[in-house]
Image: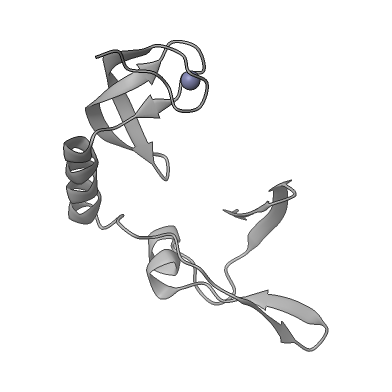
Amino acid sequence: MENKCALCNGKLKGKLVDYKIYGKSMGKFKALVCDFCGEKWFGEETARKIEEKEKELGLFGLSRETKISYSGNSLIIRIPKELARFMGLKKETSVILYPEDKNKLCVAVK
Ligand SMILES: [Zn+2]
């Protein structure tokens, strides 16, 4: 069976790749890497291993859906407590907001 990349139809090769989440390395995992576009594909078993590791480190499920609301004339975004804890955010923490692109807002701790 020949493996092809679902994005570009390039050839996939089995490799050990360094998997990072939120800037922290989770270690090396088996993946199929596309020769052409570089996309990494993890199998079900590997995905489960990565999930276990994330849970172990308390990093699992840190991304959350949140809604924008109003406060006076400003828009506010509530930051879930798990995320606040992970980033060390408290009341009065100074952060810099900047758009990374039109669909992505970054919050950087000074
Ligand atoms: Zn590809």
Nearer to us in this view, 21 or 97: 21
Of residues 1 and 98, the one nearer the viewer is: 1
Q: Going 39% across and 60% down the picture, which residue do you hit?
A: 62
Q: Based on the displayed image, in which of its 4 quarters is residue 94 positioned?
A: bottom right
Q: Is residue 50 left or right of residue 92?
A: left
In the picture shown, does residue 82 fall above or below 70?
A: above
Q: Is residue 101 above or below residue 87?
A: above
* Quarter of the image where the N terminus is located: top left
Is residue 44 shown left or right of residue 83? Answer: left
Q: How many numbered circles are shown?
A: 0
Foreground of the two, 91 or 77: 77
Most distant residue in the bottom direction:
72
Residue at 21% across / 55% down in the picture?
55
Which residue extends farthest right?
73
- Residue 69 lies, in percent from the top left, at 67, 82
Which residue is located at x 26 percent, y 58 percent? 58
Where residue 6 sits, quadrant-wise, is top left
The image position of residue 39, as x and y in percent, is 45, 25
Residue closer to the observer: 41 or 89: 41
- In the displayed structure, would residue 30 be above or below residue 1? below
- Residue under the point 52% across and 72% down: 79
Q: Residue 100: percent from the left, percent from the top?
A: 69, 45
Q: Quadrant of residue 49?
A: top left
| 99 horizontally vs 64: left or right | right
Chosen colour scheme? one colour
Q: Could you tell whether 30 is left or right of 12 in the image?
A: left
9 over 55 or under it: above or below: above
